[in-house]
Image: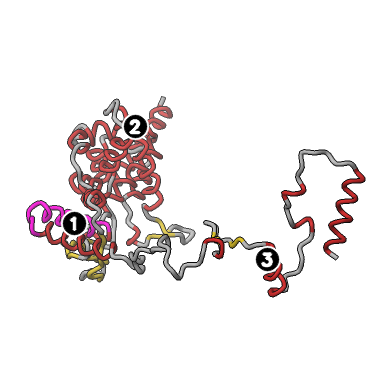
């Protein structure tokens, strides 16, 4: 009996050991994901940023990038399933747009901040000082950790009950347009306006993180500019402000379309010489005009027709070698009257005698 009690006690101690060792982490994860992890090592890995430069016993770097890759794939599948069932009858384009807004980095980064995931991330320190996507990446890595620890169903439960039921209104997200770059491109294409982005500045902040500043150009007219820690982020901000300016400032639209008018006018200017408009009067017969019998007839195919004597004279002048019988197609060879073998031979001899 004592052995059994001792065995049970040892099992309880082994179960409680990780709770005593990582009690704070377990409690935090329970508040975030809604359940206690089975294997805490997956979640520790998910919260380890590459800036820590941690390595395993074999010297290989250990961070959350692999779990981020896995979580990204699981999120796409799970959110796609949820969106498909939530909006019956909606077309593929609507479903794709809704899913992309739910799993985009800005949304995941906001969720990670509000849920307290960012405070659990192990990083070098300076990487969390600016508006990067470190939190969103950690969110994806946590989904990957849940998938390995509890399976696909646990990920679906987390997304439905924890995220969509408490933190995100899926209907508002679906019908709210947040892709300002896509909207501005669509507007420019419908109005045949040339749109481009110009890199205004590329540098680093005081912590060494890369920064970008892009400006929208519409028909060469300067739009608004935006800055961020990625090209996509800066271009989104520039497009958002440019769309706002197009709505507020009619003179800005007038300037853009005036530039478009100048461009299209230049593109439509003729680049080749115009044809001669002088009327030809070849149909008028004058005193200097030779008689029709003396003129050489020119067909629509610009071939000249001569008499037999003229043709022979031209052949002698140009020293054109005589063509073989197989090269000519003489209509005289065609006859509705059947010829005997003797008549055919006689005709051939007569033709050969004349040529010689």
Q: Position of residue 188 (x, y in %)?
A: 23, 53
The local secondary structure at tag 1 comes to helix
State the separation of the CA atoms marked 1 and 2: 31 Å
- Confirm or deny contact between disc 2 and disc 3 (CB under 8 A): no
Q: Which of disc 3 and disc 2 is earlier in sequence?
A: 2
Q: Does the magenta stretch include residue 236?
A: yes
What stretch of residues is rendered in magenta? 232-251
**Depth order, front residue of 102/354:** 354
The residue labelled by disc 3 is: 311
Magenta stretch, main secondary structure, is: helix
Please provide percent x and percent y for residue 306: 63, 63
In the rendered structure, the answer to whether residue 94 lies left or right of residue 71 reads: left
| Dot 1 alpha-carbon crowd within 10 angstroms: few under 14, some 14 to 19, many 20 or more | many
Q: In the visual, does 119 lie left or right of 253?
A: right
Q: How crowded is mark 2: few (under 14 residues within 10 Å), some or many (20 or more)?
A: some
Q: Point out residue 220 in the picture as x, y percentages from the top left corner.
A: 21, 65
Does the rendering let one see residue 119?
A: no
Q: Is residue 207 magenta?
A: no
Residue corresponding to mark 1: 237
**Front: mark 1 or 2:** 1
Marking on residue 112:
none
Q: Which of 30 and 126 is in front in this view?
A: 126
| Residue projecting furthest to the front | 287
Q: Which residue appears at 80% of the width and 38% of the height?
A: 337
Tell me, yes or no, whether the two marked residues, 1 and 3, touch with CB atoms within 8 Å: no
Is the residue under label 2 in contact with that under label 1 (CB below 8 Å)?
no
Relative to 185, does residue 284 appear above or below in the rendering? below
Q: Which of marks 1 and 3 is in front?
A: 3
Tell me how many marks there are: 3
Mark identifier at residue 81: 2
């Amino acid at each position: 009996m004592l052995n059994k009690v001792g065995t049970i006690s040892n099992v309880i101690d082994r179960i409680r050991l990780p709770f005593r060792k990582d009690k704070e982490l377990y409690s935090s994860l329970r508040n975030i994901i809604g359940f206690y992890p089975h294997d805490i090592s997956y979640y520790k890995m998910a919260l380890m940023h590459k800036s820590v430069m941690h390595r395993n016993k074999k010297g290989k770097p250990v961070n959350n990038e692999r779990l981020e890759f896995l979580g990204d794939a699981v999120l796409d599948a799970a959110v796609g399933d949820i969106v498909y069932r939530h909006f019956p009858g909606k077309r593929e384009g609507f479903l794709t747009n809704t899913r992309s807004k739910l799993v985009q980095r800005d949304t995941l980064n906001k969720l990670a901040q509000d849920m307290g995931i960012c405070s659990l991330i192990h990083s070098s320190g300076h990487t969390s000082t600016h508006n990067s996507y470190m939190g969103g990446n950690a969110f994806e890595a946590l989904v990957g950790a849940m998938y390995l620890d509890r399976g696909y169903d646990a990920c679906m439960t987390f997304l439905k009950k924890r995220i969509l039921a408490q933190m995100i209104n899926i209907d508002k997200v679906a019908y709210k347009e947040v892709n300002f770059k896509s909207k501005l491109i669509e507007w420019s294409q419908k109005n045949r306006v040339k749109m481009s982005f110009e890199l205004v500045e590329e540098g680093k902040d005081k912590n060494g993180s890369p920064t970008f500043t892009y400006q929208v150009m519409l028909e060469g007219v300067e739009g608004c500019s935006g800055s961020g820690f990625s090209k996509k982020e800066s271009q989104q901000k520039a497009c958002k402000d440019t769309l706002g300016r197009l709505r507020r400032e009619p003179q800005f639209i007038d300037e853009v379309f005036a530039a478009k008018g100048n461009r299209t006018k230049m593109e439509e200017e003729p680049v080749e010489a115009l044809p001669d408009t002088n009327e030809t009067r070849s149909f008028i017969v004058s005193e200097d005009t030779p008689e029709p019998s003396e003129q050489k007839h020119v067909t629509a195919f610009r071939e000249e027709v001569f008499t037999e004597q003229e043709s022979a004279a031209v052949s002698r002048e140009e020293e054109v070698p005589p063509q073989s019988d197989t090269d000519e197609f003489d209509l005289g060879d065609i006859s509705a009257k059947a010829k005997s073998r003797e008549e055919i031979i006689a005709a051939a001899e007569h033709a050969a005698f004349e040529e010689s």
